[in-house]
Image (spheres, rainbow, N blue to C red):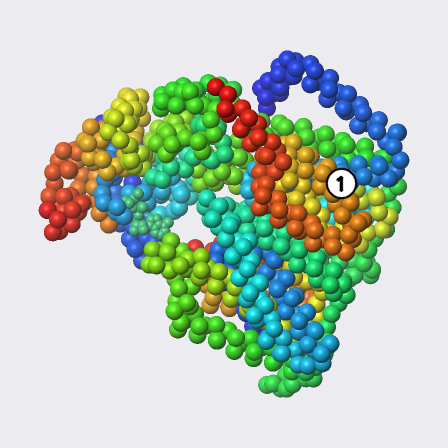
């Protein structure tokens, strides 16, 4: 087996007495899609935030591609090859759809000059299904289309690891199938993905492996099937008396 | 940058009319002092000064939304440095020294405040004019023994005009290239959402600091070039908070986020304020404040914003 | 003994800064409005006190009767008719911050221009209780001591109001989290207006006290705004106790700096402290790192 692209050991983060992440250890292999699931408030987004250096962890180590993440500013992390989307979409309002993606292209790991970057941006917009809307202001798009812009922006960076924070949430059934197909096509390119998701159908069909968080701790790890039928996981999701 | 230049050359070759138009305009601008009286020339000097300061303001604050209220601090710094050093240095050396000083002051201000949210920066710049003024006053009282300085550089209004014209042209070229380059994209991204910008690989602090310092150089140089208009300056002349305010009004009136915005705002604003300050000298500040609030509430996108919306609406119904 | 005088003077000054900053904390920490015209209310209070003392030859303390309602009402109107539209149109807190900075910057010039138009550009001051008063073997002017005592009483009253009344509780809830406050049926715009207006009344009253021992000009508001902002940020936005400590610190630094270095550099000293605090603890002396 190859060495993992991401190694997380004993990661902890406390917010004013609340343990959001608690001694978490996991790894992501090259080209692997890891599902990160758990009830709301279990610390999934916090993990992504630490991985992208949005804020430092209190304890633990994160190494990506052989380098320590701790102490790196967020923009270096992105240039090193980790790109993300946000749970609540954050388009760059006031800029065009194409410019949103262009930012990711010229400043991300790809670091391309503007002219060739523009060509790549077209390709990416076609890929996420926004081909005809490149010059529209991003504000004019629907919420779902803004999510697509965000994915294109993340992909434009040419990341080695892509962090998707509930990217499939809020899609209707047809859009969901299209979204799943899109993410699956990314897997084919050898990209490693951490998929934070509540849509279990998507988790089943996309993830190679899953870890389950509750209250910042990992309570189960394994194949999606095994994890989702695990009794403790059911209890974590449904509550003690819910089953 | 070279690819950018090539693209611009390519583009301009396709628009000979634009190129010729710009050339004629430039020739007219250079020849202007020969055909007007001193009163008009002084108005144009004023205008160029405000164009440079408002455009500099727009390039940083308009794009990033980090509102700077310190234009007068840099202007005053430049003016005072000329008053203090004018006798000792050759003019070109003087200009370099002044520019560097503005750069350094901006770096110190930026390093201590630009890492934080925009409010801290604004607050700091809000007090900066008063701060620099206090330090200069203190220095003059303690070390030199008197407040105020004579300016020993002899410059005619036309000299000042040509120098300001050069500064304005340089600024427009720099601004044009900057906004079209990757830095321009980064500035807009920072203004839209700084968190996204940094997670997209933009060295947010570096861009902010660099552009703030660069634009501050232009503000400082404006003060330096304009200083010889007065033969004597004291802190209230050099560090005039109203000037920061006027620059802000002009930039917002024209429309932020566009290189041409400030120039669109400067001319009407100067004409109006010329009228108001002679007609109602005692109520000038009040009227200025009211005018500014009217802009903030009713045309937050500025004149260019209004025009754009109008065009979009006119074009929209067509199939 | 001179050093001790300076310390005592700094303490008194700090007490007044604390009062001024508390008002700003109500406006910025609770109502979320960054008010750059804040210091103009200090000048307004000072002018009214000047009117009572120099013109009517009464005690400047009578000015409270006029200035507290005026400060409250004007600020309430400003919030209701100038700020609330900005709150409504702002897509997020950053946009509101930018808009309120711009609008109140305009307001600053309207108020300052009015002061100039009505009162002119002279330096104003009057003499009230201008005799020394001995305390711990050190002399301090009676007017300063009185100002300090009144400021302390006002701070205590405000504290009690915030602590023990229903509106006070609502305001405190708003300071912590306006969204959740809305969810528990607190009328957010109403209490934000109340907080903003209370801040305005407080700062105008502080202007009366300040004028008892400091001279002032029509253009003097900017300095008070700057100092209040520095104190609020050093103490941590919304943190009244933190602001209190920061204000005392600033008053002491200013007074000692004036004594040891030069009285002409007080603002420079304030800014120096501000920079150090910002670099060392960006969220304020008592904020989380
Ligand atoms: N920046 C923050 N400050 C304070 N608390 C936070 C912050 N971010 C997250 N939290 C808290 O940490 C816990 C985990 O949140 P989060 O990682 O967003 O959960 P999830 O993404 O799994 O729903 C929650 O209780 C949340 O309130
Ligand atoms: Mg989450």
The residue positioned 52% from the left and 75% from the top of the image is C154
Q: In terms of depth relative to the viewer, which is nearer, C240 or B287?
A: B287
Residue B259 horizontal side relative to residue B133, left or right: left
User: Where does label 1 land, which residue?
Assistant: B271
Query: Is residue C260 among what the camera can see?
Result: no
Residue A237 horizontal side relative to residue A138, left or right: left
| C50 up-or-down from B14: above or below | below
Query: Quadrant of residue A172 in the image?
Result: top left
> What x and y, as percent, mark residue B314?
55, 26
Of the 4 image quadrants, the one containing the C terminus of chain C is: bottom left
| Residue at the extreme front | B317
| C287 up-or-down from B291: above or below | below
SS at circle 1 = helix
| A63 up-or-down from C93: above or below | above
Query: Quadrant of residue B300 in the image?
Result: top right
The residue positioned 68% from the left and 44% from the top of the image is B247
Q: In terms of depth relative to the viewer, which is nearer, A150 or C187?
A: C187
> What x and y, as percent, mark residue B249?
66, 44
Q: Pointer 1 indicates a residue of which chain? A: B
Of the 4 image quadrants, the one containing the N terminus of chain C is: bottom right
> What x and y, as percent, mark residue A180?
26, 27
Image quarter where ligand 2 lies? top left
């Amino acid at each position: 087996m190859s060495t993992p692209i991401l190694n997380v050991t004993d990661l902890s983060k406390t917010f004013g007495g609340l343990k959001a992440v608690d001694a978490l250890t996991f790894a992501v292999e090259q080209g692997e899609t890891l599902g990160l699931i758990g009830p709301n408030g279990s610390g999934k987004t916090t993990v992504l935030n630490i991985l992208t250096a949005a804020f430092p962890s209190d304890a633990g180590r994160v190494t990506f591609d052989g380098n320590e993440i701790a102490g790196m500013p967020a923009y270096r992390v992105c240039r090193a090859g980790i790109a993300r989307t946000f749970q609540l979409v954050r388009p760059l309002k006031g800029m065009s759809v194409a410019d949103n993606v262009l930012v990711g292209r010229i400043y991300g790991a790809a670091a391309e000059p503007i002219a060739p970057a523009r060509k790549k941006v077209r390709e990416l917009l076609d890929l996420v299904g926004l081909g005809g809307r490149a010059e529209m202001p991003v504000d004019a798009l629907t919420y779902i289309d803004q999510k697509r812009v965000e994915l294109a922006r993340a992909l434009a960076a040419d990341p080695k690891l892509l962090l998707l924070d509930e990217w499939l949430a809020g899609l209707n059934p047809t859009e969901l199938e299209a979204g799943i197909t899109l993410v699956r096509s990314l897997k084919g390119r050898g990209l490693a993905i951490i998929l934070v998701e509540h849509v279990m159908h998507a988790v089943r069909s996309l993830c190679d492996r899953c870890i389950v968080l509750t209250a910042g701790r990992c309570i189960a790890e394994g194949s999606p099937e095994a994890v989702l039928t695990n009794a403790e996981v059911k209890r974590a999701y449904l509550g003690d008396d819910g089953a | 940058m070279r690819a950018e230049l090539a693209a611009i050359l390519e583009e301009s070759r396709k628009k000979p009319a634009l190129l010729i138009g710009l050339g004629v305009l430039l020739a007219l601008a250079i020849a202007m002092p020969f055909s007007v009286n001193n009163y008009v020339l002084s108005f144009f000097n004023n205008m160029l000064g405000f164009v440079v300061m408002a455009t500099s303001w727009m390039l940083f604050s308009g794009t990033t939304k980090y509102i700077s209220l310190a234009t007068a601090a840099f202007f005053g710094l430049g003016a005072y440095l000329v008053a203090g050093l004018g006798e000792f240095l050759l003019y070109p050396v003087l200009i370099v020294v002044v520019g560097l000083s503005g750069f350094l002051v901006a770096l110190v201000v930026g390093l201590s405040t630009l890492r934080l949210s925009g409010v801290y920066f604004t607050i700091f710049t809000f007090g900066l004019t008063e701060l620099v003024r206090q330090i200069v006053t203190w220095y003059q009282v303690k070390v030199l023994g008197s407040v105020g300085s004579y300016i020993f550089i002899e410059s005619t209004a036309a000299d000042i005009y040509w120098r300001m014209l050069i500064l304005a042209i340089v600024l427009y070229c720099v601004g044009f290239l900057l906004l079209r380059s990757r830095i321009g994209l980064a500035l807009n991204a920072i203004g839209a959402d700084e968190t996204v910008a940094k997670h997209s690989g933009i060295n947010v602090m570096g861009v902010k600091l660099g552009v703030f310092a660069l634009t501050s150089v232009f503000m400082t140089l404006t003060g330096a070039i304009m200083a010889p208009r007065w033969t004597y300056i004291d802190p209230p002349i050099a560090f005039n908070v109203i000037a920061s305010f006027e620059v802000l009004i002009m930039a917002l009136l024209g429309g932020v986020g566009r290189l041409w915005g400030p120039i669109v705002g400067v001319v009407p604003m100067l004409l109006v304020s010329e009228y108001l300050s002679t007609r109602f000298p005692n109520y000038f500040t009040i009227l200025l404040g009211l005018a500014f609030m009217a802009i903030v509430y009713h045309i937050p996108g500025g004149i260019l914003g209004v025009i754009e919306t109008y065009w979009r609406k006119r074009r929209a119904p067509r199939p | 003994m001179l050093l001790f005088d300076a310390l005592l003077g700094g303490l008194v000054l700090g007490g007044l800064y604390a009062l001024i900053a508390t008002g700003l904390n109500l406006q910025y920490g609770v109502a979320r409005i960054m008010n750059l015209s804040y210091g103009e209310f200090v000048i307004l209070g000072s002018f009214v006190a000047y009117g009572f003392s120099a013109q009517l030859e009464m005690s400047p303390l009578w000015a409270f009767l006029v200035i507290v309602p005026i400060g409250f009402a004007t600020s309430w109107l400003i919030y209701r008719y100038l700020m609330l539209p900005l709150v409504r149109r702002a897509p997020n807190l950053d946009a509101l911050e930018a808009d309120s900075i711009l609008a109140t910057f305009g307001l600053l010039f309207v108020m300052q221009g009015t002061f100039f138009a009505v009162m002119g550009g002279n330096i104003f001051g009057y003499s009230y209780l201008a005799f020394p008063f001995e305390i711990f073997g050190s002399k301090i002017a009676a007017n300063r001591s009185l100002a300090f005592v009144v400021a302390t009483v006002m701070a205590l009253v405000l504290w009690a109001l915030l602590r023990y009344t229903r509106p006070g509780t609502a305001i405190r809830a708003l300071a912590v989290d306006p969204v959740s406050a809305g969810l528990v049926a607190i009328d957010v715009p109403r209490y934000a207006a109340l907080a903003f207006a209370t801040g305005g009344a407080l700062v105008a009253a502080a202007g009366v006290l300040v004028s008892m021992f400091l001279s002032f000009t029509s253009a003097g508001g900017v300095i008070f705004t700057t100092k209040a902002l520095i104190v609020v940020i050093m103490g941590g936005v919304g943190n009244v106790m933190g602001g209190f400590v920061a204000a005392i610190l600033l008053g002491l630094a200013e007074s000692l700096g004036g004594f040891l270095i030069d009285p002409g550099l007080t603002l420079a000293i304030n800014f120096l402290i501000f920079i150090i605090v910002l670099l060392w603890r960006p969220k304020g002396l008592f904020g989380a790192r």
